Amino acid sequence: MPDKTAHKAVLSLPRGAAEMLAASLSELYWPPADAVGLFDNEDGSWRVEATFSGNLDETAFRDFLDRQGVRDACVSFEEIPDADWVAMSQAGLHPVRAGRFFIHGSHDRAKAQGNPHAIEIDAAQAFGTAHHGSTKGCLMAIDDLAAREDMKNVLDIGTGTGILAIAAARVWRARVIASDSDPVAAGIANENFRRNEVQDRVECVTASGLAHPLIGAAAPFELVIANILATPVMDMAHDIAGALRPGGVAVLSGITNEQAERVTAAYRTVGFTRLRQFAVSEWVTLTLRAD
């Protein structure tokens, strides 16, 4: 029987673009990279190496690069011997603090002992470990809202690992519906809800956007969270407005600095006012209130 193989994608970019892409490959690409490395080249550029267990769809990968604004880059793909890339990448990830929240992997469980706002999420499962600026920004937004508002009915669109749904359930003891278009990600989220002991308050459904009977039945929500990408966030503006009660709040991310004003304008046309903006590296999280 032949040895199992993994696949690696390699490309070089200016440092800022390389750092942004490396974070996105761990958090926004599905299935996420099992390990992502950044290495400086002699010519001043930075090399991104993303390793995937199993097959890698090269066309889908190039399409993702295009959506991230990485165009005309020379990408090489190669097969390499398989290894436990997940364990290797987890061991190199340190806990993240975002407001009151302390996000850690299972290998750092001892560091979180006794912390009521600790959330355990292992890397390389699905989108959301708080190492990405958009996820950290959403946690900061939730922390900020919790200081002055009480949310009891929350929707988390594109839940990924379920990290934001867990944060909402913890900080408000809210009822949360979490959705993801990928059934594998939804399954991972459910595992994390049990691991973090919020399964009695969070329900996960497989749905594209807001298109699920349970979401419709639970509306209107006091808070809708959507940490995806700018284009689908803008496409959902009308639906999110319709799912919120008057005065409800939307937390939106997966948005770059350059896209923030366009997203804000799209939501302004359906009756939203911007409350706060959180910037983490190249990523922006918007907090908006429905009129």
Image (tube, rainbow, N blue to C red):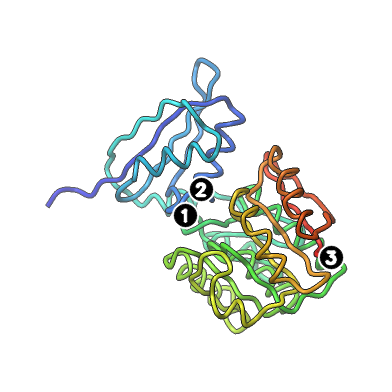
| Residue at (44, 45) in percent of width and height | 35
Q: Point out residue 36 in the picture as x, y percentages from the top left corner.
A: 47, 41
Q: Point out residue 140 in the picture as x, y percentages from the top left corner.
A: 75, 57
Q: Which residue is mark 3?
A: 291
Q: Residue 26: give its label.
A: 2
* Residue contact at pointers 3 and 1, CB within 8 angstroms: no
Distance from Cα at disc 2 to Cα at disc 3? 36 Å
| Residue at (45, 51) in percent of width and height | 32
Q: Earlier in the sequence, mark 1 or mark 2?
A: 2
**Mark 3 residue crowding within 10 angstroms, few (<14) / some (14–19) / many (20+):** some
Looking at the image, residue 219 lies above or below residue 262: below
Q: Point out residue 39 in the picture as x, y percentages from the top left corner.
A: 50, 29
Q: Which three-letter amino acid code belongs to the residue tagged 3?
A: Asp
Distance from Cα at disc 3 to Cα at disc 1? 38 Å
Distance from Cα at disc 1 to Cα at disc 2? 7 Å
* Residue contact at pointers 1 and 2, CB within 8 angstroms: yes
Q: Residue 124: give its label.
A: 1
